[in-house]
Amino acid sequence: MNQTRYKSTMEAIPFEKFLKLTGFTVDSFGFINTLEKVSHVVAPTDLVRIFMVSAMPMLYLEDLLSHIGTLGDPDNKIYANTNIRLGCVDPNMLLLGQKFVYRKNYTAILESFRHLFAEFAMPRGIFKLTPFIIVGQDTQKRIVIAHYLPPIIEVHGNKQILLDGVHRNFIAKQTGNNPETIIIERVKEPFPCEPEPWEMVHVADEKPE
């Protein structure tokens, strides 16, 4: 089916003219050059300065997940040849492999995590964040890349099992939100433990023995 594509009436502007009109300098686009200097991949919470936040292409997300192996066998790529999509999922519909949520973890998310992107024009809160590629600087002043991924669920038959993001989903459940979620279908490996409903999940101050 042919689709009608929106066509802007904006004419191309020479970059030098754009800089003059806006007052920007080449340094305003410094993050483009920093890609050549990236030395490590880190967690988003390891960043002390962010240069760029970019929406992650679906092909990049699929490739990223397809390279994940199991803990005992890194060559067992469990998400290769699966169906990966995004959707807003009611956390009350999920089963969990984890039986505890840690108070200090979900408190830290509520109090601190959103500040990471405070200087960027992004959705407010944590529930509408989609996958992002982040270029920034860590505590050692290295130029690094980080990936933000929303919660991940695996679909096994009629069960939706939360693999990652239990604390974000706990907050969503308590506040009545349906967070953006990565949904993985046709996973070839069974879930590594017996999933439980939320009724079996307890809040803990410390990790149980």
Image (spheres, helix red, strand yellow):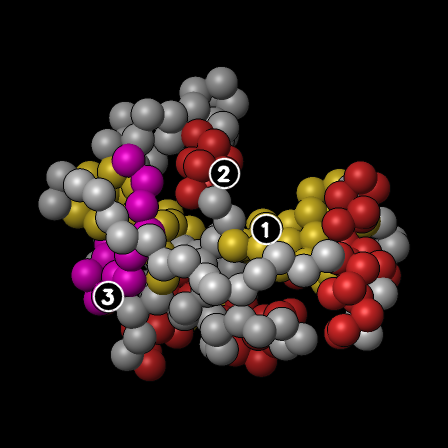
Inspect the image, locate mark 1, and give the three-letter code of the amino acid beneath it. Answer: Ile
Query: Gap between marks 2 and 1, in whole Å?
Result: 10 Å
Alpha carbon separation for disc pair 3 and 2: 26 Å
Which amino acid, mark 2?
Tyr
Answer left or right for 84 relative to 156: right
Label 1 crowd bin: few (<14), some (14–19), many (20+), radius 10 Å: some
State whether residue 100 appears in this view: no
Residue at image mark 3: 90
Whether residue 81 can be seen here:
yes
Q: Position of residue 36 (x, y in %)?
A: 80, 39
Residue drawn at 42 percent across, 43 percent down = 58
- Drawn side of residue 71 relative to residue 140, left or right: left
Q: Considering depth in this image, is 172 or 30 the residue closer to the camera? A: 30
Sequence-wise, which precedes: disc 2 or disc 1? Answer: 2
Instruction: Write down the region rendered in magenta.
Output: 83-96
Question: Mark 1 and 3 residues: CB-CB less than 8 Å, in contact?
Answer: no
Name above or below for residue 114 compared with residue 157: below
Q: Position of residue 4 (x, y in %)?
A: 27, 53
Q: First in sequence: mark 3 or mark 2? A: 2
Residue 108 colored in magenta in the image: no
Residue 83 position by quadrant: top left
Determine the secondary structure under disc 2: helix
Q: Residues within 10 Å of mark 3 (few under 14, many from 20)?
A: some
Q: Dot 1 corresponds to which residue?
A: 133
Q: Report which residue position mark 2 lands on.
A: 60
In the displayed structure, 117 sits above or below 4; it is: below
Q: Which is nearer the eye, 135 or 103? A: 135
Q: Badge 2 local density, few (<14 within 10 Å), some, or many (20+)?
A: few
